Image (cartoon, rainbow, N blue to C red):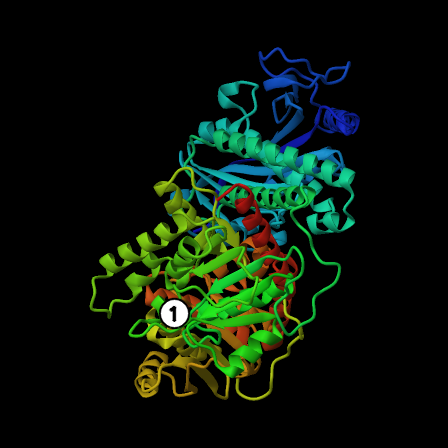
Amino acid sequence: MSARLTSPNVIAHVFTFAEGPLAEAGSELVWDVWNRSRDLLHTTAPIGSLGLPTEPPAAGFRSGHTRSTPLAGAESTGGSAQLVLRAEHDVLALSVLLKHPDQTWIELDRLLRTVLGATASSVLGSAIVHVAEAEGLDHGAGFGGDLRELLPSASQAPDWWHRGGRLGNGLALWESSAVDDHRAHRELVVLARLGERHVLGNWTWSHDGRPEMPPLARYLMHLAKIRYQLRVWSRLPAAAELCRRADANELGETMTTMTAMRHTVDIAEANAVRALADLPLPDNGVDPVTDDRALASWFAQQLDDDIVYLTTFHEGALRRPASPAPRGGPRTVPGGERVLVVADEWFPRRGGLSAFNRYLCTALAAESAAVFCYLPMASDDERTDAASAGVTLVVAPKVPGGSEKVALMRKPALPAGIVPDVIIGHGRVTGPMAQCLTDDHFPNAARVHFVHMEPDEVEWQKLDREEDSGVRADDRCRAEVDLAEHASRTVAVGPRLAGWMERDLLARNSSAPRVHQFDPGFDSPDPVRRSPLPGDPQILVLGRMEDAEVKGVDIAACAVGQARRLAHVDGKWELLVRGANVGESLPLWTKINNWVSHPSIGVRIRPYSTEFARIAEDLRRASLVLMPSRAEGFGLVGLEAVVAGTPTLVSGESGLGLLLRSVLDRELAARVVVPVTKDLESDARTWSTMITSVLLNKQAAFDTAERVRTTMATARSWSSAVSALLVSVRDARRRGR
């Protein structure tokens, strides 16, 4: 269908300061816009019977209005343009409305921008809102392509119609500007069903003709406050840099500034939520309001981490060495934490958790912690590999007739004088052993419980097990929460697991501390910009194939077959699946060939491998890595592919997918993160389109992979991740947890 709009209007909200060093510039901005509107739009008449002055106060603006207070208002003859100036607390809000029955959004938008003039540095934030009634809005079809032709800002964000959807009361909301967390200016589209003009006006311009600020304007004002604080915070020296300077005055001033910022973010977020309290949001999780709330939550966590870090240093608890300790052994430098990590293996024979443990231990050692990894057994190769990273492997004493788990509950034989400050357990795999070691042998150590998976997501994909899936999921979820409840600090890998664990932990114990979200690093010691290799393109799927359904191998295979039919090119493609158990390669090869169902695709099955060199070679050889998991707490395989610079498609159901969406801009994230549903046919169709676009333009795909890698490496490094973790643990110890 075509998008038919009725009564297209354009609204601008400009928020500036009523007090402080930028108040004078804010006042000048208001007068400039007011005078241009009077000259260009002839806004000299009073607005109805409101009784507002038609000019801003000549004596200046007084701050401190605890409620939205109208200060001035004017309109043109016939009412095709209106201005309203309001004050609320320390903010001036200037709103401009343009409407004309014979003009389009583009024409009205052009005139409005002329009235607004250039954006000034005194602006707290601003927004342009395109509003209209739309025929067929309830059907939700066809609007993306049609509205793009009607919208001035669509070229900045070509996928804008994916970032919103239907709200309550017959309204729909999208953000049409390019997404940038620091943006001072934003652009939105609000549509209403035909005949709902009153609802549309109440929400976007004036409620029942009253001059107070409408809900959307109030919401945008409070989000502008949060983004302004984010821009200020981003210009401050990094917490680690301040600690290196060790300037007590500077530390104190910055701590005060950040504490005030944290308070402002809390208040602004609460006020923003109240502004839209009566309006249900879309349930697709990609609307502007959900994005805003995620940004506020992330920023609050960053401020919390910085404040704890600076406070701890200021109190003298944090002492970092002047230079790195030599490699080849534990870093027992003064002040460096002594960390005991309980694991079931060093080389990752059993999968991603073990690989994560190796990365974590290596990164902790690089941050000058003395790291001891407690294991049931260790080969000479494993000891050598760990020692090269500054980690000492400690083998548990055997228990006659006892299991490996029982052995890991015994007191480890650590070097003389070493008593752990921190004991780390991984989920229900080694979490119980870490708890026993803390309770029975090292009561003064802080216990850190890492969460790597959500059983409720995973167990229902394993329908081939004899036990009841619901019982198994319930038992394993309760075990995770039990271990987390009394830990000194619960740490969840990635945003998906952090959200789940925080919810369930607070449901159990409302006084439980916040879960610490741990985002693994995307940095590499030897980053290399990649280019596609010659020969037939190879598509790679990595992971233990005993969980093939969970990993979405059927989605990958069906999608590759469909993509090959879509591509219409000569030559062959290869699908390499690395992760078969011994003795299961042939049945897996048969199953995947049936899913692929295309003669020009060669299926290659390889056994699961713990050899890092072999996996690295697989990643370098691949033209594309697929991770279409139906359930994935994080997705370390996808992270490794991104770090390798290989084009990668990641499930939107994974924690990695959520993390990429939160860091990358929308356009870039859309090239990497792909939706996964419960419908194999639909998923295969969606993934096949993405696979085709990658393999038909491999160089562009490798360029995209490089942008993703460099952006993520800058935003998420192993050093910053473990530094924040250690700060969080120190805070827990300081509070006596």
Q: What element carries label 1?
A: helix
| Amino acid bearing label 1 | Lys
Q: Which sits in the foreground, 528 or 98?
A: 528
Q: Residue at x 74, y 47 (%)?
A: 242
Q: Percent from the top left, x then y, of residue 191? A: 48, 39
Q: Percent from the top left, x then y, of residue 695? A: 53, 77
Q: In which quarter of the image is residue 475?
A: bottom left
Q: Quadrant of residue 29?
A: top right
In the image, residue 320 above or below residue 324: above
Q: Percent from the top left, x then y, of residue 275? A: 50, 29
Q: Percent from the top left, x then y, of residue 103? A: 60, 37
Provide the residue designation for mark 1.
551
Q: Residues within 10 Å of mark 1 (few under 14, many from 20)?
A: many
In the image, residue 524 above or below residue 511: below
Instruction: Please give the count of numbered marks on the rendered protein.
Output: 1
Going by the image, does 55 lie left or right of 6?
Answer: right
Q: Quadrant of residue 375?
A: bottom left
Can residue 691 be seen?
no
Can residue 473 be seen?
yes
Q: Which sits in the foreground, 620 or 387?
A: 387
Q: Which residue extends farthest front?
A: 416
Q: Residue at x 76, y 40 (%)?
A: 248
Q: Residue at x 38, y 62 (%)?
A: 631
